[in-house]
């Protein structure tokens, strides 16, 4: 069974940093692109970032470009999201999600993790 | 940037057919994916590549995509179908979600 478990969320002050992790199991991690998708309280889904299976290609939403960095450690079956210069508008539940192919930008997201809540507030 | 437009809400009588639309410029040329999200839970894929139903998704769920509109169709709507639905595409190396539609089953 494919499982994705996020961790690392919490309360952080504006301008601060946080690193999210997503531990994957049940599939050959390096063969699939992965993404982060977030959802602000009471709002819709917003794609944040994607990374190819090899880690060689990364993609970002304009809203986080230059502040967030996606990475992966295929030896540890773990996806990361380093978030710097956090703003109040980054407050959201952050989900990791598996793509259906190694390429980063063509597939659906299935499955999703349970999410981890990030609150940016002073 | 590419935009997807969904109605904020759709209502359907119990047992009838619900249709949730997703509008976008020439969306028919893209692969559209649909997700169901129940309160407090992660989204679940219900339709991939316009009309493909993943394992475990009831046959009542179907999809189509042509021109400027993609449609998620839920036949014989049940009380358990009452929740939020999102469409998604890729454009210029970025994933785009529609704003979401709340389905109400009357």
Image (cartoon, coloured by chain):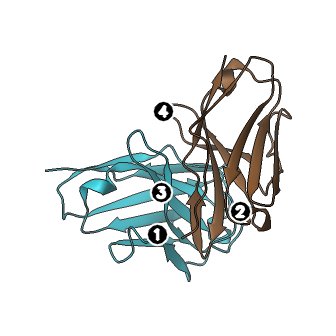
Chain colours: A cyan, B brown
* Residue B102 point in image, percent of width and height: 58, 33
| Badge number at residue A100 | 2
Nearest to the eye among marks 3 and 4: give it: 4
Q: Which residue is mark 3?
A: A22
**Quadrant of the rendered image containing residue B53:** top right
Query: Mark 1 and mark 2, same subunit?
Result: yes
- Compared with B104, B95 (above or below) is below
**Quadrant of the rendered image containing residue A65:** bottom left
Q: Is residue B45 left or right of residue A73?
A: right
Q: What is the CA distance from the residue labelled 2 to the residue labelled 3? A: 17 Å
Q: Name the residue furthest right.
A: B59
Query: Mark 2 and mark 4, same subunit?
Result: no
| Badge number at residue B40 | 4
| Contact, mark 1 vs mark 2 (Cβ under 8 Å) | no
Is residue A109 at all visible to an observer of this figure?
no
Q: What is the CA distance from the residue labelled 3 to the residue labelled 1? A: 19 Å
| Contact, mark 2 vs mark 4 (Cβ under 8 Å) | no
| Badge number at residue A39 | none
Q: What is the CA distance from the residue labelled 3 to the residue labelled 4? A: 19 Å
**Secondary structure of the residue carrying numbered label 1:** loop
Q: What is the CA distance from the residue labelled 1 to the residue labelled 2? A: 20 Å
Q: Name the residue furthest bottom.
A: A56
What is the crowding at mark 1: few (fewer than 14 residues within 10 Å), some, or many (at least 20)?
Answer: some
**Secondary structure of the residue carrying numbered label 3:** strand
Q: Which residue is mark 1?
A: A61
């Amino acid at each position: 069974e494919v499982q994705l478990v996020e961790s690392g969320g919490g309360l952080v002050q504006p301008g601060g940093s946080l690193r999210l992790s997503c531990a994957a199991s049940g599939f050959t991690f390096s063969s699939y692109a992965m993404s982060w998708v977030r959802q602000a309280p009471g709002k819709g889904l917003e794609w944040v970032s994607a990374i190819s299976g090899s880690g060689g290609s990364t993609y970002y939403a304009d809203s986080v470009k230059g502040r967030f960095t996606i990475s992966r450690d295929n030896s540890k079956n773990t996806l990361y999201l380093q978030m710097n210069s956090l703003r109040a508008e980054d407050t959201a539940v952050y989900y990791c999600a598996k793509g259906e192919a190694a390429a980063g930008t063509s597939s659906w997201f299935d499955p999703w993790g349970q999410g981890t809540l990030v609150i940016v507030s002073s | 940037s590419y935009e997807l437009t969904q109605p904020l809400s759709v209502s359907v009588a119990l047992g009838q057919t619900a249709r949730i639309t997703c509008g976008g410029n020439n969306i028919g040329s893209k692969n559209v994916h649909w997700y169901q999200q129940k309160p407090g839970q992660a989204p679940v894929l219900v339709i991939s590549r316009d009309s493909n139903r993943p394992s475990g998704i009831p046959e009542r769920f179907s999809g189509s995509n042509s021109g400027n509109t993609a449609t998620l169709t839920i036949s014989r709507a049940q009380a358990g179908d009452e929740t939020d639905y999102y469409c998604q595409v890729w454009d210029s190396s970025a994933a785009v979600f529609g704003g979401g539609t709340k389905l109400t089953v009357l």
